[in-house]
Image (spheres, rainbow, N blue to C red):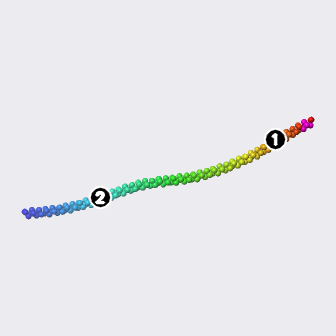
Amino acid sequence: MHLRGAAVLLQSLARRSTALRQLQRARQAAICMQRHARGLLARRQLQEQRAACVRIQAAWRAKHGQKQFLRQKQAAILLQAHARRSAVQRRYQHLRAAAVSLQSCWRARQARLLLKQHKAARSVQRLWRGYAARKQLQQQQAAATRIQAAWRGSYAQRQFQR
């Protein structure tokens, strides 16, 4: 029986050794599978994080681009408003200068006409005064002549009656 016990022991050691090798292989296979599974999960998680990062960057760039666009649009509107205001001011100044020039010409014309009228009025007044003075002189001369004639007539009658 001793041999039998030794054979059983050898078989049991052989089974144990085989079982340990299978266990070791199974453990190595499990470790390899876990490593691959963890790597796959890590790569997926990294892809998801990258995708999330890309979405965040895209959203930030869109928001930043929109803000920059709005700032540029406001700046363009402001520049256009200043340009329009400047053009309107230039047009207004041009029109105002034209209006002032027209008014000046009109006033000068009116002044020349008024001066001409005053000159004509002075001429009419001068002629009228001359006419009136001559008429008055004629009347005075006629009156003086009548007075002289009356006095001479009266004097001659007095002389004749004497």
Residue drawn at (14%, 63%) of the image: 14
* Number of numbered markers: 2
Describe residue 154's horizontal placement relative to residue 90 as left or right.
Answer: right
Give 2 or 161, whichever is nearer the viewer: 161
Residue drawn at (9%, 62%) of the image: 5
Give 91 or 120, whichever is nearer the viewer: 120
> What residue sits right under mark 2 in the picture?
42
Q: CA distance from mark 1 to mark 2?
A: 141 Å
Q: Please, what is the three-letter code of the amino acid marked with disc 2?
A: Ala
Q: Position of residue 17 (x, y in %)?
A: 16, 62
Describe residue 47's horizontal placement relative to residue 90 as left or right.
Answer: left
Give 57 or 4, whichever is nearer the viewer: 57
Residue lying at the far top of the rendered structure: 162
Residue lying at the far left of the rendered structure: 1
Mark 2, residues whose alpha carbon is within 10 Å: few (<14), some, or many (≥20)?
Answer: few
In the image, residue 153 sits, relative to residue 35, either above or below, namely: above
Q: Position of residue 136 (x, y in %)?
A: 80, 42
In the image, residue 146 sits, relative to residue 12, either above or below, namely: above
Magenta segment: does it hold 2? no
> What residue sits right under mark 1 in the picture?
140
What residue span does the magenta drawing correspond to?
156-160
Q: Please, what is the three-letter code of the amino acid marked with disc 1?
A: Gln
Give the quarter of the image for residue 54.
bottom left
